[in-house]
Image (tube, rainbow, N blue to C red):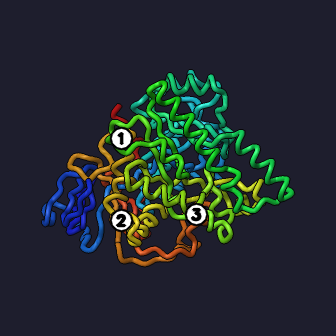
Amino acid sequence: MSTIAINNATIINEGKHFSGSVLLKNGLIESIGLNKAFTNNTKTIIDAQGKFLIPGVIDDQVHFREPGLTHKGDIYSESKAAVAGGVTSFMDMPNTNPQTITIEELDKKHDIASIRSLANFSFYLGATNSNIQEIIKADPRKICGIKVFMGSSTGNMLVDDAESLDMIFRTSPVLVATHCEDEETIKQNTIYYNKVYNKDIPFSYHPLIRSSEACYLSSNLAVKLAKQYKTKLHLLHLSTEKEMDLLSNNTPLSDKLITGEVCVHHLWFSDKDYNNLGWRIKWNPAIKTPSDRDALIEGLISNKLDVVATDHAPHTIKEKENPYLTCPSGGPLVQHSLIAMLEMVRKGIFTIEMVVEKMCHSPAELFKIDKRGYIREGYHADLVLIDPNAIRKVTKENILYKCGWSPFENETFSHRVTHTFVNGRLVYDNGRFDESVKGSALCFSR
């Protein structure tokens, strides 16, 4: 493998930013130089003057739709969009076809990714009401976590049996990650609004059907189970102000029993956007009020929330254009998550150091990923170069998702990812891809 020098960058890492250069060799970060450039015995030199250099983004929640749902997206197409957006590692969800609810099916996904994924990868083992024997077999060094749908969503993997939930939390050998929405509350709300609107429910009622109450009831139950059994719990895609009361900001991330994730769409949009965007922003849990969004932003700044992810979940336009009750929830985000967060930095909402912490450092710490998530000597060279002065509009022509659309379509961003390195290889270079070598399975130091 050739040696690459990235010279004269503004390095954003571990709460600091400074001018420096990084030398990559044999897939690792060989050396970091302050105020100096590397030139000797270097095959490739990239002058990064005026650009930010950050660790690769680690997205802990994506749905790349393979196997079985590849008309929406697949590991190849969505990982390609991911690296173009600065995402170098992803953790994929189990609601595929077949569902990833056995170690055998999980191994099959690893085999697919090893020959198709441009980014590094890991996969959740899905929980059901009856697969506890598979969960017990989970290898903490190879599996990112156990995914529990405590509310139904795409794929019908609802775990709604109290005894099964107890068993999962009591015996899981790895982190438990939950989708929390109370099923009975959602069912009753759906019946009510279905009668009111004669089955023609406006999309703007999505956050009233999948309500704040539904989210809190389920999240609160998950927290109680985690505390009862001392289980490491990661609450995915939190969406409400009230759920912030379940989280602590007085404990270092490495010592937290209960952690929280927020997704980019819950930080960017509010229920005021349903009238214009409709199905494009129908996610589960629902995007809610400006007050909820403000509380999520504050929760991230105050360290109650630990990770920013996407819940990247593509569907075709034909599927999404269905009426509310038959329109699937979810949308594509991995190509635009980093630049959307950097746009919020430009607006003064976040600092760039905090964005790097929540999208790069914290996922690595929380999941105990081996030697990734930081710019450190000896670490895997997963790196991203960003031009902070490259205005670009999101259009159908530059969207890479297989589904061909984005909730950010026609949005203009002020930052652009120019280079993405995965394991020391320049995989993405200003619109050009090197697909000759694929990503690696993530390893966990547990």
Residue at horizontal 86%, vertical 57%?
Answer: 198
Rounded to the nearest angstrom, the CA distance separating label 3 from label 1 is 33 Å
The residue that appears at 36% across and 55% down in the rendered structure is: 56
Give residue 52's quadrant in the image. bottom left
Q: Which residue is mark 3?
A: 270
Check residue 419 in the rendering and tell me which mark sits there, or answer none. Answer: 2
Quick one: quadrant of the C terminus?
Answer: top left
Is 424 in front, or is 168? 168
Residue 4 in the image: state x and y as whole percent.
24, 60
Crowding near the residue tagged with mark 1, few <14, some 14–19, many ≥20 C-alpha atoms within 10 Å: many
The kind of residue tagged 2 is: His
At 71% from the left edge and 45% from the top edge, which residue is drawn? 186
Tell which tag, 3 or 1, sits nearer the viewer: 3
Q: Secondary structure at mark 1?
A: loop
- Please give left or right for residue 384 compared with residue 171 in the image: left
Q: Is residue 3 left or right of residue 368?
A: left
Q: Check disc 1 and give the amino acid type.
A: Ile
Is residue 174 placed above or below 186 in the rendered structure?
A: above
Tag of residue 369: 1
Q: Earlier in the sequence, mark 1 or mark 2?
A: 1
Residue 12 appears in the rendering: yes
Tag 1–tag 2 contact (CB < 8 Å): no
Indicate the position of residue 391 as horizontal and vertical percent values. Answer: 43, 78
Of mark 3 and mark 1, the one earlier in the sequence is 3
Residue contact at pointers 3 and 1, CB within 8 angstroms: no
Viewer-nearest of labels 3 and 2?
Answer: 3
Q: Position of residue 112 (x, y in %)?
A: 52, 43
Mark 3 or mark 2: which comes first in sequence? 3
